[in-house]
Image: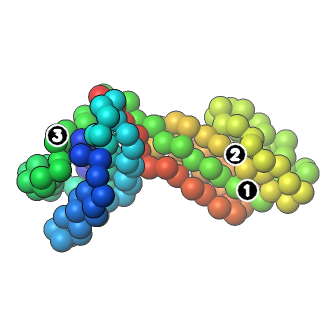
Amino acid sequence: MKYTLSVLVENRPGVLARVVSLFARRGYNIDALTVGASETPGIARMTLSGEGDNYILEQMEKQLNKIVPVIKVRSLGPEAMRSELMLLKLNCDPPSFGQIHQIATLMDAQVVQVTRSSVTLRFAGSPEQCDTLFELTRPFGVKEVARSGVLAVD
């Protein structure tokens, strides 16, 4: 089962290291982690996502709540809005550009850089939409991919 946790923490040095080491000590893998300012000054929001059963999810929530700089932990359900940013650099010769541009238009991705041998797309959407764009463009040859990790609000 996939999970997404939203964790509000005091925005100070060492908090991220404490959270990540907690997961490592327990043997839990984090598939994606994003950290940024929240709506409250001095408070950061961490969004963690991965896979695990209900027991693992419950244990992670309990352990996170024991860390002193953690203010609030919430497990986000399927109704939460999730989004990712992806940069995708593809091999591209002139004859392939039309096909890649057509896929980008269909997926609402932006062409942000074109060279003689490559094209770079920027895309923001759900993790599943990012996966779809990646799979649709894979036949052209992926030179590089960078994904932000999940951002989510409930």
Report the side of 100 relative to 79 (left or right). Answer: right
Tell me which residue sits at (25%, 36%) in the image: 76
In the rendered image, residue 51, in percent from the top left (x then y), is placed at 28, 55
Instruction: Report which residue position mark 2 lands on.
Output: 121
Report if the CB atoms under discs 1 and 2 are less than 8 Å apart.
yes
Can the viewer see residue 59? no
Q: Which numbered disc, 1 or 2, marks the residue that appears first in the sequence?
A: 1
Above or below, 125 relative to 24? above
Report the side of 73 relative to 110 (left or right). Answer: left
Distance Cα–Cα, label 1 vs label 2? 8 Å
Above or below, 1 relative to 144? above
Report the side of 121 relative to 115 (left or right). Answer: left
Tell me which residue sits at (86%, 54%) in the image: 115
Can the viewer see residue 10? yes
Given residues 1 and 149, the one toward you in this image is: 149
Question: Amino acid under label 3?
Answer: Lys
- Residue 90's disc is 1
Provide the secondary structure element on which disc 3 rests: strand
**Around disc 1, counting alpha carbons within 10 Å, would you say few (fewer than 14), some (14 to 19), or many (20 or more)?**
many
Provide the secondary structure element on which disc 2 rests: strand
In the rendered image, residue 152, in percent from the top left (x then y), is placed at 36, 36
Question: Amino acid under label 1?
Answer: Leu
Q: Quadrant of the C terminus?
A: top left
In the rendered image, residue 25, in percent from the top left (x then y), is placed at 18, 71
Instruction: Report which residue position mark 3 lands on.
Output: 72
**Around disc 3, counting alpha carbons within 10 Å, would you say few (fewer than 14), some (14 to 19), or many (20 or more)?**
few
Quarter of the figure with residue 109: top right
Q: Which numbered disc, 3 or 2, marks the residue that appears first in the sequence?
A: 3
Mark 3 or mark 2, which is nearer to you?
3
